[in-house]
Amino acid sequence: MTGATYIFFLFGVLLHVFGAALIARYLWDTKLTVLKVANTLAWGATACLIVALGVRWFQWQLLPLTGVTDAVSLLMIFSMGAATTVAWDTDRKAMLCFYLPPLATVGALTLLFSSRGLTSPPRELAGPLLVAHVGMVFLSMALLFVASLTSVAYTFQARRLKLRRTTGLFQKLPSLEELDRSLYQLIRMGYPIYVVTYLVGLFWAFYDNQLLSAAWWFSPKIVISGGILLFYAFSFHARARGLLRGPKLAYSVIFGVGLLLGTYLVLMMLEVVNYNFYGKPA
Amino acid sequence: MTVAVTGISHHTSSLDLRERLAFAEGSIPAALHKLKKRLSDGGVVILSTCNRVEIYTRSDDAPPVVFETVRRFLEEWHGVPEAEFADALYEYADREAVAHVFRVASSLDSLVIGEQQILGQVHDAYLLAHSEAATEKIISALFQRAFKVAKEVRTKSTISQGKVSVASVAVDLAVSIFSDLADKTVMIIGSGETGELALRSLISQGVKQVLLVNRTVEKAQELAAKYHGRAYALDNLHEILPQADIIITSTASPEPILRREDFHRALKHRNQSPMFIIDIAVPRDVDREANQLDNIYLYDIDDLQEVADSNLQARRAEIAQCMEIVDKQVSRFMQWRQQLYAEPTIVSMSQEWHQIRERELQKTLHTLNDLTEKQREEVEYLTKRIVNNILQRPMSQIKQEVVREDPHRVIHLVKRLFGLEESAG
């Protein structure tokens, strides 16, 4: 079973890497067919990752949500879903140039440094509230991650317009207005999910705080997540009111996602046991 | 069977000469009929645009005879002595002619490479010739193939991407900022030919709301009536500035009329919605500093020209790839055309063999009186199948040989081998 999990994860990552390599080819000759093949490969990769998670679930009879490899798989699956929705139309397919290579990089790094996580069983989450919390964390992260990649596309497009470099990929990407709209829609979905996720986490920590230390409300995860939430609250409402738009909004989304993913990864890697959700501190 | 092209273009001649040799639209049908009569079993298409005058012909005459006929025709029709256009004239036959037609239709021979107008012009020229019954099988096939090649070149390369005229570059840039121009407002400040050209292009892309600003309201009203817009005096400019998504300015003001602060204020009023400014005035109407603001995209006439030039350069870089497509299609067309040489001989061969079959079948059926009607039909069907099966291989072989070898020699050999009459084919 572990072997099957590993093979599916490996195939998932490799297909993503092949898809990303085709993006390089697309940037060379801008042939739509190449992009479509890359998209198909990325979907094949996503299917492999879903199967890998399914096998782990079947093998251990536990939801695979807690390890780095499982987390990355979920993030990649949700991100691919969000990315495909944005780049669904033919005239938006070039957006994949900004989505597929980062996803492939995340997958490849996980394969290189954390693939051992595939051999160990996932740790049990204490109650359905936590399962919902962790699942929603990855969904909101994926939406905000894709929003940040859309922001990169926006800044690329805006910068090229300012510099009068309007050939090549520039001609294949959607208009600034469309990119801004996609970016806003992704935040509009990602931000409320993140808020709900945070509230669910707080609710669980408040009622089940015997699993955490007495000062649970002062834990880095909760404090930093609260800070990020405030940051997104500002970005979201400023955009909704038309105060923050264009390159500034794009930069703030990139910064926010960097902070979110960075915090999550650092805390996860440091295994800050006092603040985890699995059960009693080790 | 000669396919030929005779013509002059922007590559070889001055506009003055092209004007003298151009065919007025109404005169083309008469010209087609006159030239067709002079060609042996021929077909003619005449393409006359501001950048080229070309006559495409298909005839049983040899290339030098066709070229001579067309030269005489041009001389007589336009009353221009041959000596005056002989140096500018190019003449292509067979493979070169086919390649030229494909290049022209694909806009690889155009003044502005990749422009799409030429395909429409070639299409119209062919349709006119076809409706006047001036075309025949090969010339029709040539043009149908040329349209397919043009489509393939357009879809498999980026030769038509990126506009190359200042007005169309402006529209392209507007489309890369705004997703839908239909709900956008265009403001024209001042009056000028390029500005109006850009406005017309924007209107053709769906822009409905136009604000016209001029130093004198009367002039603005005049333009507003023309473009169904609203007229304002220049004094109201700052007040209405936030309404505009796209601004085209071309006043004769010696000082900038719009500064960074004006756009800063306008953006606040517009909730930071982007603004695209095309400043085609010399000296410039908009302070360059404005471009430093987020969501402001300011292009002056030099910037637009720079974009147009880089688009043209990008198109030129695609030519080699497009020529590969053209070469491949030329080879296919030539192969198809070569195979046509064999068609009459193959038909004649098939007729000859079936005549033998029929003769021998009748002799045999006379001796077999006991056969029922159904049995007779079956025997006849059997003989047909045998003959068709025997013929299948030589027929396909002949088609291949006429492509590989000298078709006249191959046909001659086949005729001798099967005892066919020399007139066949």
Image (tube, grey):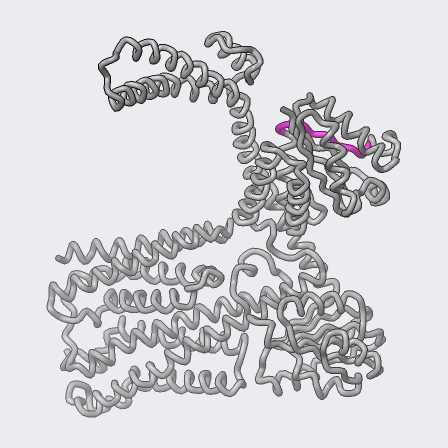
The quadrant where residue B98 appears: top right
**Quadrant into which the C terminus of chain B falls:** top right
On screen, B100 above or below B255? Answer: above
Q: Nearer the viewer, residue B353 or B146?
A: B353
Query: At which x and y percent is residue A131?
Result: 20, 78
Q: Quadrant of the N terminus of chain B?
A: top right
| Count of numbered labels shown in the rendering | 0
Residue A162 in view here? no
Q: Residue at x 51, y 71 (%)?
A: A178
Please tell me in which quadrant of the rendered image residue B382 appears.
top left
Q: Is residue B72 above or below residue A51?
A: above
Where is residue B342 drawn, in percent x and y?
51, 21
The image quarter in which residue A236 lies: bottom left
Is residue B272 left or right of A103 when viewed as pictured? right
Residue placed at 66% from the left, 32% from the top?
B43
Point out the stretch of residues depicted in magenta: B87-95
Q: Residue B262 lies in magenta, yes or no?
A: no
